[in-house]
Image: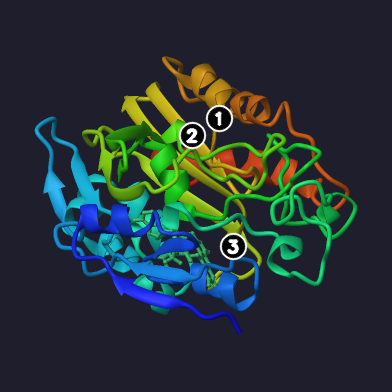
Amino acid sequence: MDAITYERAADVADAVRAVQQPGAVFIGGGTNLLDLMKGGVERPVRLIDITHIGGLDGFTTLPDGGIRIGALVRNSDAANHALVREQYPLLSQAFLSGASAQLRNMATVGGNLLQRTRCAYFYDTAFSQCNKRVLGSGCAALEGHNRMHAILGASPQCVAVNPSDMSVALAALDAVVRVSGPAGERSIPFAEFHRLPGDRPDVDTTLRPGELITAIDLPPPLFSAHSHYLKVRDRASYAFSLVSVAAALQMDGERVQTARIALGGIAHKPWRASAAEQMLNGQPLTQTALNNAAAAALRDARPLAGNRFKVQLAQRAIVRAVNQAAGRTGGVA
Ligand SMILES: Cc1cc2nc3c(=O)[nH]c(=O)nc-3n(C[C@H](O)[C@H](O)[C@H](O)COP(=O)(O)OP(=O)(O)OC[C@H]3O[C@@H](n4cnc5c(N)ncnc54)[C@H](O)[C@@H]3O)c2cc1C
């Protein structure tokens, strides 16, 4: 049993200062960090509890019409807030599809962004091969049980996927992550926040050491009339996604003005389907156009032995989600 000290940060500056001590980490709701500690995957010696910092647990309307969600807002509160439900229903749906009610009541928005990629070989230290835990040790999932793993953007070092539903919606909405650290404050565009594994699968994000996430900014709500979050999973009640799709559209009659499509469950980061978006932008939303766009989104897929099914599943999920976003009930091509 490792000895651990516990401190409550009084404010942002206090938190940033405290986390620079050796072996210190922030703790939000603790729903991911404590699991990792219990399994011996992470071994911090100082927990800096940030949940008592004032001013990071609210919603603010921004001058451009967007909203700022504080990093300490619990997932349940974010999902059910009137501004989110009415103006960003895509995000509300994504929150509500994640984890269980009890977990959502504990989990913070900032912690959700930083939950580690899911892979049984990463979470179980009985397996010696995991480049994410021990760089250079190998990747047991490559030849092992890889049904849940990546089909896009993986590397020979790591095929784990990012499990956050919230982040898939935030990717489609072009959110911005606000952080405060030893060098001051900065804003990180969502597409640049999570990383592909490359040869550093141990690093999930572009957050710098000592940086605290303080908020997420959402741009003005352009997609509230036409959006849909579709999560395909083994159990409807409670499971990580096999594939998920955040679809957001601006429509002019039957023509797509702007399409935003992000995929979850298929890569080390939320995956923007830019090629599919470009094929739909400015075009009538016909079934053929949608099928072609969905095929383009998965053109570069490199499935593993256990997850070849995900390629077609993702294509069909895109078709269904975009159709539902457009207000059509039809789905699978
Ligand atoms: C059984 C189970 C099922 C789940 N199913 C789903 C699911 O279907 N979909 C889904 O999306 N999620 C799912 N989750 C994950 C859950 O959403 C995350 O555990 C949760 O969002 C993490 O938030 P937290 O506040 O508890 O983070 P913590 O566990 O407190 O922290 C996670 C990490 O973030 C860091 N951190 C926390 N806050 C900040 C901050 N403000 N700034 C900088 N660093 C910070 C911590 O140091 C830690 O490294 C599931 C979890 C469990 C246990």
Crowd class of label 3 (few under 14; some 14 to 19; many from 20; radius 10 Å): many
**On the rendered structure, is 316 left or right of 82?**
right
The mark that comes first in sequence, 1 or 3, is 3
Residue 273's disc number: 1
Q: The residue under label 3 is which amino acid type? A: Phe
Please tell me which of labels 1 and 2 falls first in the chain.
2
x and y percent of residue 147 in the render?
78, 56
Q: In this picture, is 56 found above or below 245? A: below
Residue named by callout 3: 240
**Which amino acid type is marked by label 2?**
Ile
Q: Label for residue 261?
A: 2
Residue located 37% across and 42% down the image = 227
Marks 1/3: CA distance? 20 Å
Residue 288, x across and y down, in percent: 61, 24
Q: Residue at x 73, y 27 (%)?
A: 300
Circles 1 and 2 in contact, beta carbons < 8 Å:
yes
Q: For the residues marked 2 and 3, what is the alpha-carbon distance in whole angstroms?
A: 19 Å
Location of residue 288 with respect to 185 vertically, above or below: above
Q: Is mark 3 within 8 Å of ligand 1?
A: yes
